[in-house]
Amino acid sequence: MARYTGPVCRLCRRHGEKLFLKGERCFTPKCSFERRPNPPGPRPARRRKVSDRGLQLREKQRARVAYGVLEKQFVRYYKEAIRRPGVSGENLVRLLETRLDNIVYRLGFADSRSQARQIVRHGIITVDGRKLDVPSAHLKEGETVGFTPRGLRSEYYKIVQENIKSKNVPSWLTLDVAAMKGRVSGMPTVAQGETHLFNENVIIEYYSR
């Protein structure tokens, strides 16, 4: 399946939850979900009861859309989560959070994960001083994220410099505003992920059936 390229606000309305896919716009009155929280398309004549399997699917889809991951990638993360020692749900959240595009977003270098994925693909992000243009690359504890020399000369970098101070960085990341570099100082926990949008244990149950 190809990546979805349509209006992302429809995804929030479809899944019945604000997934913050458009960055700062999601915090303003212009947010489409605030104005039209009902699902897109014609309204059904009667409300149908959702099965347990349907509820599990909804949780999985919310997580997948929030992190911008395709189904094939998501299945791969599930298999890796259950293979690793520890709680499978926590492992799944950790795999999603340690993606390079998510860390770029969490550090405040981008307003949304889609924007973070775009600037990574454009080759202006470095990991430990070396350019890395793979958004799905997983970072380890101790690795640093910064900008390439070309990125430092870009207009985008100047915009990020102006807005970076208003960003909130999670405790498992360290941000050096002066140097415009971030560091993975620890591993994220379940509480530090996007678990207010989905239940990771329900997702594990969905794939385990």
Image (cartoon, helix red, strand yellow):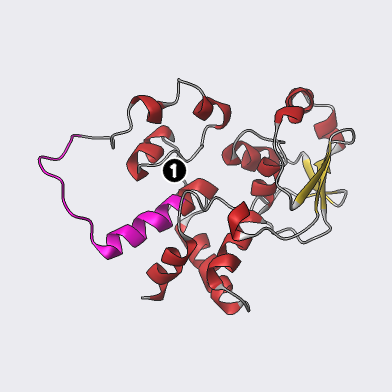
Residue density around tag 1, few if under 14, some if 14–19, many if 20 or more, within 10 Å: few
Measured as percent of width and height from the top left, residue 63 is found at 47, 53
Magenta span has 53? yes
Q: Which residue is mark 1?
A: 4
Q: Which quadrant holds residue 37?
A: top left
Instruction: Identify which residue is drawn at 44% across, 43% down.
Output: 4
Instruction: Identify which residue is drawn at 56% across, 65% down.
Output: 92
Magenta span has 178? no
Measured as percent of width and height from the top left, residue 204 is found at 45, 69
Task: Evaluate whether residue 7 shows in this view.
Answer: no
Position of 117 with respect to 31 (left or right) is right
Task: Evaluate whether residue 26 shows in this view.
Answer: yes
Position of 174 with respect to 81 (left or right) is right
Q: Which quadrant holds residue 34?
A: top left
Magenta-highlighted residues: 42-62
**Quadrant of the image for the N terminus?**
bottom left
Position of 35 with respect to 156 (left or right) is left
